[in-house]
Amino acid sequence: MKAAVYAGNQSFDVKDIPTPEPGPDQVLLKVKYSAICGTDVHTFLYDQAPSGIVMGHEYCGTIAHVGADVTRWKVGDRVLGGGGAPLPGAGPAFVTDPRYKYREVGFTGRPLRGYAEYVVMEEWEPVLIPDGVSDEAASLCEPCAVAVRAVRHSKVKLGDKVAVLGAGPIGLFCIQAVKAAGAGAVYVSEPVPVRAEAARNVGADLVIDPTGEDVVARLEELTDGLGPDVVFDCAGATPTLDQAMNIVRRDGQVMLVAVAWTEVPLLPVDWMAREVSIQSTWGGRHEDWKIALELLRTGKIIVGPMLTSSSFIPLDDIQDAFESLIKPTTQLQMVVVP
């Protein structure tokens, strides 16, 4: 099969490798789409992945072969490449490892994943894609589940005013998930015009350009001088965490969703007297994937504004795609077609 093997030093080697053979309790998935995740881009940028692995964890496809002891699946089933309920003692390291550090151990799991034509998975790992969810939408279920978990982990209440910093894919999903949870208004900070427009198209009540307007002052104005009840940092840029702490209201909550790979400055004296709280969130659990699928099925979350014809790239173009994503870009979401 063809796969994009990470060769180290910000380099992929697209080549033929042996198609994996499923064991008796495993299935072989034919990958249709594998979306490019920001964490993979960071891993590429900082050369964190070991040579010889195949990255990609936002994928979907069809079951091509089932092991002898598999009863849950049959050939032809449309499934997500993850999201299943783990067996006791199983599951991703960020759930099972009590001292998990993504930067150090993020790639100690399965060496062959979604940037390939086929993937072997344990029987419990996939989730069935329901009718009404397209393959394109299914390929983005994992980042949607991340946003769902962030919102479920937050203190958002019906009618709350919410701010979302950053309108990349996770931010766009957070806008929609928090709307589905009952937020009264969602304000977005995003400097890139194409992402700002996408934020409007998925339901943002107002989008602020932080390069031309004081975000803190504008959000104070929009919230009667109080600040938003909850702020989601979906940007992970150098100033956004401190900015979020300055934006949020007294006793409010900042949800840290984005992953910052470099040190970020904080000036607590500016905001700590308001007794604000910060809550981090990571990934999605089985229940988050199921909720995300239902929101996609019912149209409460849409992916159309995030995808264009140029979003879909062949496996052979993955090197150029990653190089473009580590620089300033107008892309919203890129999806590999193995």
Image (spheres, rainbow, N blue to C red):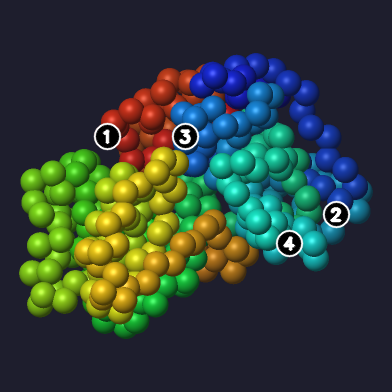
Indicate whether 300 appears above or below 52.
Answer: below
Q: Is residue 119 left or right of residue 176?
A: right
Judge depth for marks 3 and 2 and give the one in front: 3
Q: Residues within 10 Å of mark 3 (few under 14, many from 20)?
A: some
What residue is disc 1 on?
330
Numbered tag placed on residue 302 in the rendering: none
Dividing the picture into quadrants, the one containing residue 223 is bottom left
Spatial separation of the CA atoms under disc 1 and disc 3: 15 Å
Q: Name the residue type under label 2.
A: Val
Q: Secondary structure at mark 2?
A: loop
Spatial separation of the CA atoms under disc 4 and disc 1: 37 Å
Seen as rendered, the residue at the extreme bottom is 158
Spatial separation of the CA atoms under disc 2 and disc 1: 44 Å
- N-terminal of the pair, mark 2 or mark 1, is 2
Spatial separation of the CA atoms under disc 2 and disc 4: 15 Å
What residue is disc 3 on?
41
Residue at point 70%, 57% (across, down): 97
